[in-house]
Image: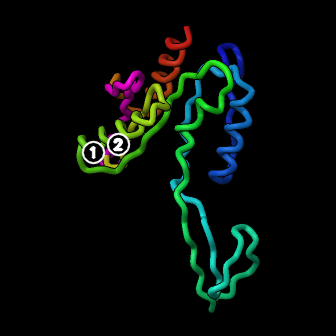
Amino acid sequence: PRPGRVARILDYGSFAELDGALREVLQEGDFGAVVHLAAVSDYSVGSIEVGGRPQAPGVIGKIRSDEELVLRLKPNFKIVERIKGYVPGPKPLLIAFKLTHTPSAEERVAAVRKLAGSGAPDFIVHNDLGDREKGQPVFRLFETRGGRCHEVRNFASREELAQGLVHVVQGELR
């Protein structure tokens, strides 16, 4: 919500629930910024077979342990690419997060550029599992508006990142 209003935290249990909740809340409009940091699944269950028989997802009861179970996954769309479209009026500032696990800095930047190329986020916070595994939690903030993708700042902790994002949002909404 705009400055002076309370932020909203959405609880969800599945990809579909998150997408539906975001669509519903954002259609109310009047959001200055959206920080989308949910770890959203890239896949959902497309179909289920139990013992060679198709089953509807979410309707299966007890599965016998001697029956073969086959799950087919389908790719989910990227919610972050739709967020601004869910808002009927002026589009909010959108900050997205991108987690990678790649060995090289070039691959990390390529992953950020790919998300930036969707045209959705204004800023992307990037972090890499490899850095975390080394005990070096680095968060890189990229500005991605207007076809550009350049690194703005690095943060060494979650606390620094939170303070930095508050500063970015406040500056953008002035």
The amino acid pointed to by label 2 is Ala
In the displayed structure, 82 sits above or below 152; it is: below
Residue drawn at the location 74% of the way across and 36% of the way down = 24
Q: In what element is the residue under mark 2? A: helix
Residue drawn at the location 63% of the way across and 89% of the way down = 67
Q: In what element is the residue under mark 1? A: helix
* Residue 144 picture location, percent across and down: 40, 26
Q: Quadrant of residue 64?
A: bottom right
Which of 166 and 62 lies nearest the eye of the viewer? 62
Is 50 covered by the magenta stretch?
Answer: no
Q: Quadrant of the C terminus?
A: top right
Say whether residue 47 is visible. Answer: yes
Label at residue 118: none
* Residue 95 picture location, percent across and down: 50, 29
Outermost residue toward the top? 174
How many C-alpha atoms fall within 10 Å of the one at disc 1: few (<14), some, or many (≥20)?
A: few
Label at residue 107: 1
Residue drawn at the location 34% of the way across and 25% of the way down = 148
Is 144 covered by the magenta stretch?
Answer: yes
Disc 1 from disc 2: Cα separation: 6 Å
Q: Which residue is mark 2?
A: 111
Residue drawn at the location 52% of the way across and 38% of the way down = 81
Contact between marks 1 and 2 (CB within 8 A): the answer is yes
How many C-alpha atoms fall within 10 Å of the one at disc 2: few (<14), some, or many (≥20)?
A: some
Q: Is residue 17 left or right of residue 162?
A: right
Q: What span is colored magenta in the figure? A: 131-150
* Residue 128 picture location, percent across and down: 36, 44
Q: Quadrant of residue 143?
A: top left
Q: Quadrant of the N terminus?
A: top right
